[in-house]
Image: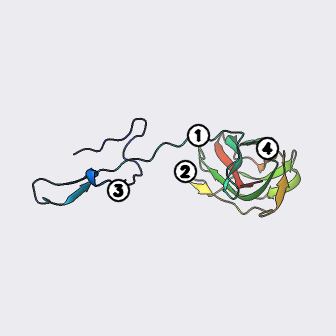
Amino acid sequence: MGVDYPSGIPGPAVCTWDSDPSHITTIPAGPNQGQLIYDFFAPEPQPIPDMDQAPANGTLTTLFSRKNASFNSTADQALTQTFNFSACTIQFISINGATIPLTTAKGGIYTGPGKTGTAILPATQSYAGLVTSLDVINPMITISGQRILTPATFYLSLTTPQGSPCTANVSLMGLAG
């Protein structure tokens, strides 16, 4: 007996039982004869949020990000604000998806270009924990819990490049509003 998933939802999915007794059957034959089988239904798909709409208050979310940031460059690399908001509190930073082991790269994240403004991560931050594309690091930030007015731009600015072409994804996570 197969499970039919609503169109557009690949199976298997996180499912819930709808409590309808007509969806309960028993196994007709074999060693498990008489055991109950429940028909499960996947939850309704949720709409993708509008980029101009902030998540609900108190929801931890990605506030700023940069996909494929170069870890072989000392140039300023701006992180993009992911939706419109006027203030935020950065809770943590997540860096993942390194294309090679980042054994040499060091540098920080700042509120101003040219390593100016407030250092969110210090210039000495190492990324050596990123060995494979599956590794994730969450380095200790220097302003945890401080409210920041936006539009602020955050910059990844390395002091020591990796020495060969490589990229990784950088996300600033926290609360908007």
Mark earlier in primary sequence (3, 1): 3
The residue where tag 4 is placed is 74
Q: Tell me: 23 left or right of 125.
A: left
Mark earlier in primary sequence (4, 1): 1
Q: Is residue 71 visible?
A: no
* Element type at mark 1: loop
Whole-number angstrom distance, CA of label 3 to CA of label 1: 28 Å
Whole-number angstrom distance, CA of label 4 to CA of label 3: 59 Å
Whole-number angstrom distance, CA of label 4 to CA of label 2: 22 Å
Quadrant of the rendered image containing residue 147: bottom right
The residue where tag 1 is placed is 48
Badge 3: how crowded within 10 Å, few (<14), some, or many (20+)? few
Q: Nearer the viewer, mark 3 or mark 1?
A: 3
Whole-number angstrom distance, CA of label 4 to CA of label 1: 35 Å
Q: What colouring method underlies this structural image?
A: rainbow
Q: Amino acid at mark 2?
A: Thr
Whole-number angstrom distance, CA of label 3 to CA of label 2: 44 Å
Q: Are marks 4 and 1 in contact (CB under 8 Å)?
A: no
The residue where tag 3 is placed is 19
Q: Tell me: 112 left or right of 164.
A: right
The residue where tag 2 is placed is 132
Q: Are marks 3 and 2 in contact (CB under 8 Å)?
A: no
**Relative image position of residue 130 (x, y in whole percent):** 61, 54
Mark earlier in primary sequence (3, 2): 3
Mark earlier in primary sequence (4, 3): 3
Quadrant of the rendered image containing residue 145: bottom right
* Element type at mark 2: loop
* Element type at mark 3: loop
